[in-house]
Amino acid sequence: MPTTYTARWLFPVAGPPLARGTLTVDGEYITHVSPHGVMKPDVDLGQVAIIPGLVNAHTHLDLSGARGQIPPTTADKFPDWLGAVIAYRRQTRMTLDDIHTGLAESLRYGTTCLGDISTDGASFPILAAAPVRAVVYHEVLGLIPKRYEAMLERFQAWLASTADTPTVRRGISPHAPYSTASRVYEVARQLEPRLQIATHLAESPAEMMLLRTHSGPMRQFLDSILAWDPSGLMGWDSPLYIHELRDCPRGLIVHGNWLNGYLYADAIPSNLSLVVCPRTHAAFGHPLHPWPTFAAAGVRVAVGTDSLASNPDLDILAELRCLRRTNPDIPGEQLLRKGTLNGADALGFADITGSLEAGKSADFVAIPVPDVNTDDPHELLLGDDHGTRSVWFRGEKVV
Ligand SMILES: [Zn+2]
């Protein structure tokens, strides 16, 4: 039996908000999205906005134990923060509990689709058993051949011992050009069959200086942990490997805080997306993020929380609210799209989720909103938080 839901607002994202619109769900799929008065509602969710399940395009669930323990530094001290993360990881080891904690928190906030960077791919079976869609990117790094060859071996073993599920796919994440040899990027893009890729890029001024001059605080840091080897390092003048990722099914360029002057929008092929992490960006005090320029040039922009090592929580709506504060001129409709449909598209799930449309999976969230009149109902979502959310995945209420 189909169920028709209504609420104060319905945000299909694929179209304009509908005041007291209805969403009809049959089994796990949406069958109708209608303006008020067309379908008779069975369930009135009240003073809430129904929106598509949120999409967190970049996180590291296995760092969920680090909340509040590694305060972000200023942007110029980024290598110090990185050192603290590595020290934290060596002391605590990764635990599956941390992945469960991060997953439960993500669901509570209404995230039904995520891109997770994973040490040894450990989150794969947990996410595959959970009410969520995901791409699990097995992390590989190292400038020194012995280091990255060992990691590639572990990655290949993981690939051979797992299989994609209907909701979770496997990907690979060469960590970043300052920490990872170009050979790893080469292997990643030549895998057969092709896998989805994610890489951190242009995150800190120290990274940009290292790529340009092979010196500076990142060089000192890599020296200090015996990880420096310039032989495999990509050069400042050749971010061309980005273009070489054009044959991957989907790829993510994560952060991009310092992309200006390094990579131009027209060098980014359409299968790649730029993932910004607004609150992490703000916590390090980087200058205003250049993403609006890239978005205006046609690059798909999605949003991530990054990990709890640099962020207070895993709430994508809080990231969009941060973007509202830093970019007050961008229409709310575009911001909501970054945390839903753009994210789903960036992760290769736009055919099944990311918007409320007939035929898509019934993945949606009920967000409490204030009872006020407004010219743009998106602002009701992008203002203050008004309480606990309810979440549906494939038609079932899961939170
Ligand atoms: Zn990250």
Image (cartoon, rainbow, N blue to C red):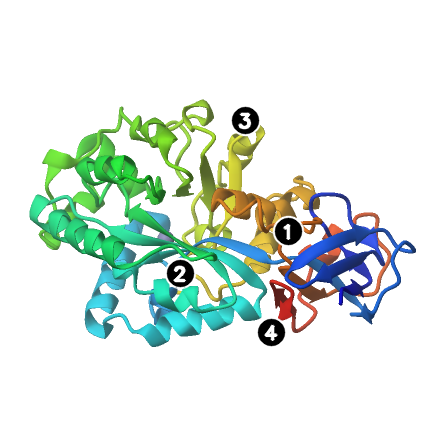
Mark nearest the camera among 1 and 4 is 1
Crowd around label 3: few <14 · some 14–19 · many ≥20 (10 Å): few
In the image, residue 191 above or below residue 57: above
Give the number of the disc on residue 360. 1
Of marks 2 and 3, which one's residue comes earlier in the chain? 3
Q: CA distance from mark 2 to mark 3?
A: 28 Å
Residue on which the image places disc 2:
307
Q: CA distance from mark 1 to mark 2?
A: 29 Å
Residue on which the image places disc 4:
399
Determine whether label 1 and label 4 are within 8 Å by CB.
Answer: no
Give the amino acid type for the residue marked by disc 2 in the picture. Ser
- Residue depicted at 21% across the width and 32% down the height: 234
Of marks 1 and 2, which one's residue comes earlier in the chain? 2
Q: CA distance from mark 4 to mark 3?
A: 38 Å
Q: Position of residue 198 (x, y in %)?
A: 36, 45
Mark nearest the camera among 3 and 1 is 1
Image quadrant where one finds the N terminus: bottom right
Of marks 4 and 3, which one's residue comes earlier in the chain? 3
Residue on which the image places disc 3:
297
Of marks 1 and 4, which one's residue comes earlier in the chain? 1
